[in-house]
Amino acid sequence: MTAAQIKAIRTTQPGGTEILESISLTLGAPGQGEVLLRQTAIGVNLIDVYQRMASSGQYAIEHPAILGVEAAGVIEAIGPGVSDLNIGDRVAYWMVRGAYAQKRLIDASRLVKLPDFVSDETAAACMVKGTTAYYLLHRIYAVKPGDVVLVHSAAGGVGQLLCQWAKHLGATVIGTVGSTEKIAVAKAMGCDHVIVYRDTDFAAKVRELTAGQGVHVVYDSIGKDTFEGSLNALRPLGTMVSFGQASGPVPPIDISVLAQKGSVFLAKPTLATFTQKRSDIESLATGLFQALGNGVITVDIKHRAPLSEVALMHNALEARQTMGSIVLTP
Ligand SMILES: NC(=O)c1ccc[n+]([C@@H]2O[C@H](COP(=O)([O-])OP(=O)(O)OC[C@H]3O[C@@H](n4cnc5c(N)ncnc54)[C@H](OP(=O)(O)O)[C@@H]3O)[C@@H](O)[C@H]2O)c1
């Protein structure tokens, strides 16, 4: 195999979008257990923004780095020790950094084959977001018919999938959105009620909508700005799932607050825990592909751009101007 010349987007330090630079790289042949993947579609996630910006804490990474944690593509070459994949297979991966590139070398054990009914673009748009929705709704708090569920940022990437799936599981879904133009999208994704939460006491509104009862579970990806309100929106024995920090990290809390709010449960899960083992990767992918195949969820790709314009997509995400998924074309 001859060396592959490719373009990638690299960072050399944490910072704003100005640190995203286009570079040329030469890739060698795949090593033991690796494949060379020609990427056809690359997903963008808020995690990429956190990793670009963080100089310390949970999301800090080593630089120089190639950001991006999910993509789909076609296998071009196979290294020694890879027996279950072939050249030409259509595959996807998620939670493996280094996606902002035309091609990459990747550990074959992180790949899943794509069924015919899942396009490369759809896979790149939902491996992270869809598997997150799957484990949050089935493993962290198992949503059941009759539950009342609160989903923040209901028109966002993960939010849209949580709403559709929770509705399918039989829940009444209350969604929050940051601006009025997102209301119709949240409704189309299965929300029974939508609250524009930017300047509203959303917990009071939730109490009004639930005859004072509160919700069984809150899926909170906003963090600092919503944490307290989310606890206040719960019914006794409810579950608060704090799985993101779009507005910033939640400050340390006194755990006695969980008793005061009605013996509520608090979970702080990360997808990394659910993608450590090969069996977990396979079961999450199976759960997601079944939901796509059965029409339980549809993936709304609202934003498409060439890889070279990734900075524009980061800016839009940070400015709360996106809805649904963002896909880059290498
Ligand atoms: N724990 C896990 O396993 C896991 C896995 C994947 C993703 N996540 C988390 O899930 C969340 C959603 O990710 P995504 O990629 O689908 O992004 P997204 O929801 O499409 O975009 C972020 C949204 O957050 C809302 N937001 C509220 N305050 C914000 C602020 N100060 N700055 C920016 N956005 C703000 C905005 O929606 P509104 O305008 O409607 O408020 C914005 O559109 C992220 O917090 C991410 O870290 C967690």
Image (cartoon, helix red, strand yellow):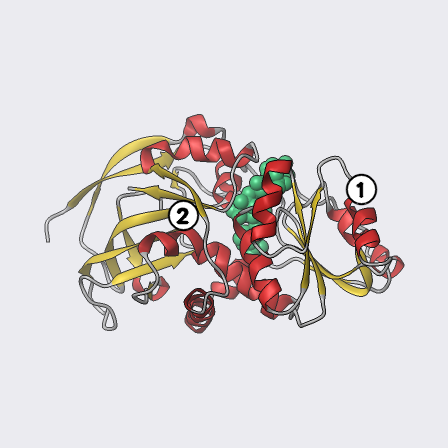
Residue at 67%, 72% in the rendered image: 145
Tell me if residue 58 can be seen. no
Report crowding for label 2: few under 14, some 14 to 19, many 20 or more residues within 10 A (C-alpha).
many
Residue 155 position, x and y percent, is 57, 46
Q: Amino acid at mark 1?
A: Asp
Tell me if residue 308 can be seen. yes
Rendered-image quadrant of the C terminus = top left
Q: Is residue 223 above or below residue 277?
A: above
Instruction: Name the residue tied to disc 2.
Output: 43
Judging depth in this view, the residue of 129 and 101 nearest the camera is 129
> Which of the two discs, 2 and 1, labels the residue nearer the N terminus?
2
Instruction: Name the residue tied to disc 1.
Output: 201
Q: Amino acid at mark 2?
A: Gly
For mark 2, give the secondary structure. Answer: strand
Q: Quadrant of ligand 1?
A: top right
Rendered-image quadrant of the N terminus = bottom left
